[in-house]
Amino acid sequence: MPDEWDIDDAFIITPSGKKICDFKRLNLHVLGYSEAVDKLLSLDELKAHLHTLKDLPNAVPYATSYYERRWGFCIAKNELDTLEAGTYHAVIKSSFNPNGHLRYARIFIPATQKTDETILISTYLCHPQMANNELSGPVVWANLVRFVKSLNTRRYNYEFVITPETIGSICYIHENFSRLKQNVKGGFVLTCIGDEREYGLVLSPDEQRLSDKIALHTIKHLTNKPKIYSFKERGSDERQYNTPALDLGVVALSRSKFGEYKEYHTSLDDLSFISQKGLNGGFLYARNCILNLETNAKFLLNTICEPNLGSRGLIRTLSLGKNHEAHMILRDFLAFCNGKNDALKIAEILGSQLYKLRPIIEVLLKNNLIKEVK
Amino acid sequence: MPDEWDIDDAFIITPSGKKICDFKRLNLHVLGYSEAVDKLLSLDELKAHLHTLKDLPNAVPYATSYYERRWGFCIAKNELDTLEAGTYHAVIKSSFNPNGHLRYARIFIPATQKTDETILISTYLCHPQMANNELSGPVVWANLVRFVKSLNTRRYNYEFVITPETIGSICYIHENFSRLKQNVKGGFVLTCIGDEREYGLVLSPDEQRLSDKIALHTIKHLTNKPKIYSFKERGSDERQYNTPALDLGVVALSRSKFGEYKEYHTSLDDLSFISQKGLNGGFLYARNCILNLETNAKFLLNTICEPNLGSRGLIRTLSLGKNHEAHMILRDFLAFCNGKNDALKIAEILGSQLYKLRPIIEVLLKNNLIKEVK
Amino acid sequence: MPDEWDIDDAFIITPSGKKICDFKRLNLHVLGYSEAVDKLLSLDELKAHLHTLKDLPNAVPYATSYYERRWGFCIAKNELDTLEAGTYHAVIKSSFNPNGHLRYARIFIPATQKTDETILISTYLCHPQMANNELSGPVVWANLVRFVKSLNTRRYNYEFVITPETIGSICYIHENFSRLKQNVKGGFVLTCIGDEREYGLVLSPDEQRLSDKIALHTIKHLTNKPKIYSFKERGSDERQYNTPALDLGVVALSRSKFGEYKEYHTSLDDLSFISQKGLNGGFLYARNCILNLETNAKFLLNTICEPNLGSRGLIRTLSLGKNHEAHMILRDFLAFCNGKNDALKIAEILGSQLYKLRPIIEVLLKNNLIKEVK
């Protein structure tokens, strides 16, 4: 566990007295985990500590030292090119605290009926000065907390977690390993989920878990061109939740995924990159995953043959020419209620999004035509 | 169980004294399960009881009440449009019998060697005034009974059943549930099987049963463009035989399937819609399913390595240049006789219809090169 | 077991005294397993004993009697057409020996650590007068023996076998049945592997064995258009090694496979048909199969979450903008080390040939980040 890094201020004074790389204006200007410095240097000496991006000359890169002691600043290539010769004054007021703390938050929302089965919803908070990666995650996450609390019934417990990426989820896992391993039946990492580009997801390593099936079903009803990535394209905390020892079968939900857009990990990933509409779409995506999860169960037909739906007032009793399209979905749902198919599979067969079948399932349960089975 | 419906006559007398909707001429004119009526009505009052099809103005629709008490007539849209104003006399001479009977027929043809394993062949007889759906079914079914009886050997028992659709198969199932559940290894429902259009089938819900495999194999050798429907497109008695509690893995065999042709469930589905050639094709289809079923078994090679077929006189002993194509099928069949593949799978590998391999299998058994295994 | 066939000489003297079909010049001229003859015949009588190929008029066919007593010569169609009328003298000096021997060779190269697990590498030596089928096999086989001996470590024992095709492998199997059945985990038959045409393979009957997976992986990295044949296209000793009773899951490796080139089993399959380059390619193909086999194992990550590779000096500690492509393969490999995936599957996910990951696996083992599991 590396020492905690604290920083108060950082800047460079140019030979002409101008303050540049001002941490207080844009904290990306400091290389993350930089040690303290207060030094006069020539331009050439300074340049060895300046990080820039050739491909995006207007962008300040986001850079971090993991966790070697060094110091540095990040600066746009275009600005770097204007720097005059002379003596620069580099100042970083930082410190390392071997007794520091790593903070993370956890919100547990219990199921309606007592159960251990838990869904994990995770995002990260460590560099929110970038908008899509990462501010969008906490925004959607917070709205999702509110949504899950508002549900009348919950089949699962929900554990909402927000940590610094990687190091935070590793700590969280170490402190909660057995409980997570035993109870978590699936989950979602929310990342880069606030822009208006295409919906995407990163599958779990085995690609066949509950979360994989739910997320694939959900995204298909949001868009015709979903971006489906294998775990080879992982990048956020799904890396930790899916390590072999833990193996939670967690899926990452995103719009423009990490590494797939040029503004990623630079100052260009700012508030103009995300939007209300983009965030709403991200929320809808995550919300539908939860609704589909909550609707999913296995049902078994209670009658030996097809039940008479007409005598129960569930379909018209007058058959004329063709089948009555409107009521076929009721019959179709029943036809596959064999106690082995889950409702997700039936929804796939019927071409409907799962949670939209909820009224039908409720009518059938109420009429005692099906029962839920484990 | 609804009351039995009996009907003697039904008709309407127009203001000018003409008899229309005459049950004795075309029994589709009466709404099925109509209660008795003997009433004078205005044209407008009458129209509330007339059923017609906008899309097919020359067709009398087939309509039934399940099983609510009402009355009505079915009439072609074009005829309806010619009706004059005035007083009509509607007569239906029907009655309901709470002590009625539901009749079905069952023919059991035993296997050559005693076994419980049974194949179910079912069709329905409830509205034979329509030709493809349904007269074709009983015609092919009856010929199939004759064919199965004529077989020298039968691996399975065959249970041939003919009932009124839906209500009849439900009764039959209720009276035979345990026996069917225990003994039936597969089966076929014959429906809409007398026209000359493309061959089709409706798979069982799990799509992997013996009947599914046999029917898919058979249809592929009949046509290059088979119409394969999932159980979502079910419509005849396969609905009952495949309900979760019974789950017989039954497949529906058809040519122009129910609901897939515009004449379906109207007076236009008459004898001109089917033909000798169409019925012969339907019979061939069902017959080949049975022949393929009867040929299917698992075989195991009796020798450690490849047997010497030349010394047994089964292939030429002179090898010249290329392999002798003609005898390769014998060797190919043996190459896959591992006691795990069934003959159906081997036939698929070899690109041959299964029942056409029967002479080869018989030669190999006779020469003690293979043995049948369970 | 047929009698051993020995032959000293064979030829025909034409009416004009010319010696044709001279065994000493080209031994294909004699029908294999011909009985002795010393006879004067008319041209027409002789023709009943002459074998020729209409499609390849310049080729002397390769023909054999299995194992019926007859005699014959093979001759090019073009030469046959020039034969004059008159009396011919046909001479074959051959004999059958009921106390003969069938010879085969076996080289056993043990694994580095004692194990029973063995890989079988087989080829055949019975008609080496043909170059691709069959001289190429023994040439590549012999080089492979040298290569396997030179390996520093061997995970498996290697059993190299060379026999007369079919009859030889049958004898070898009968003498070694239990040992082969118990110990052989896979293997390769080398056949027709010396020309420069496309790489090919014949899968084992179940197509999913270790050798199938290794050969499919290997060939994909050699060529974009591999020729993958099912076991239906078998033809060499894989026929015997894969019979149901033995079922070793053996794959045949080839370039222009038996039966797929017109020169096959004729005098045109001579040294001009193969080349140094072709043989080198065949050797590379077989060698890479072995290297991939030797690299394959299951590994399990030793840490609970992702290990810190930076602190171990395995990747750079400075993260700037994008991920460091160069080191991603290390992380990617670890991400899938769940003790269930074998390294072959991981290599497929990563798009790398398996044996090229060996340095990475060795670094990870050395740093105690993964362990091999059974």
Image: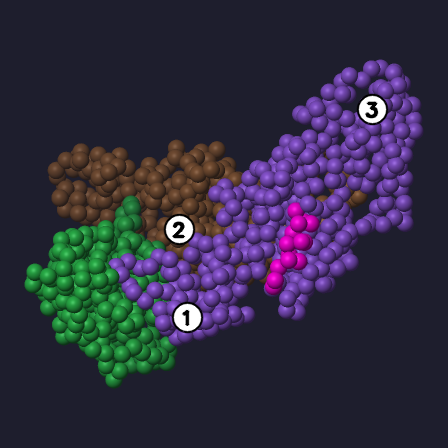
Chain colours: A purple, B green, C brown
Task: Mark 2 vs mark 1: give the one in front.
Answer: 1
Residue lying at 26% horizontally and 70% vertically, measured from the top left: B70
- The chain letter under disc 2 is C
Marks 3 & 1 on one chain: no
Q: Position of residue B238 (x, y in %)?
A: 32, 67
Q: Secondary structure at mark 1?
A: loop
Task: Mark 2 vs mark 3: give the one in front.
Answer: 3
Q: Are marks 3 and 1 in contact (CB under 8 Å)?
A: no
Residue lying at 10% horizontally and 61% vertically, measured from the top left: B15
Residue range corresponding to the magenta coloring: A140-153
Left or right, C78 with reference to B337: left
| Badge 2 amino acid | Ser
Q: Label 3 to label 1, Cα distance in Å?
A: 73 Å
Magenta stretch containing residue A148, yes or no? yes
Q: Label 2 to label 1, Cα distance in Å?
A: 38 Å
In the rendered image of this protein, does residue B372 appear above or below residue A181? below
Instruction: Give C96 or C106, whichever is nearer the viewer.
Output: C106
Instruction: Give A327 or B123, whichever is nearer the viewer.
Output: A327
Decide: few, some or many residues near mark 3? Use Cα within 10 Å; few <14, some 14-19, many ≥20. Answer: some
Q: Are marks 2 and 3 in contact (CB under 8 Å)?
A: no
Examine the residues drawn in magenta and state their main secondary structure.
Answer: helix
Q: Position of residue A325 (x, y in %)?
A: 35, 57
* Quarter of the view holding residue B241: bottom left
In the rendered image of this protein, does residue B91 appear above or below residue B352? below
Q: Find disc 3 in the rendering and name its residue.
A: A20
| Badge 3 amino acid | Ile
Q: Find disc 2 in the rendering and name its residue.
A: C230
Q: Label 2 to label 3, Cα distance in Å?
A: 69 Å
Marks 2 & 1 on one chain: no
Q: Secondary structure at mark 3?
A: strand
Magenta stretch containing residue C342, yes or no? no
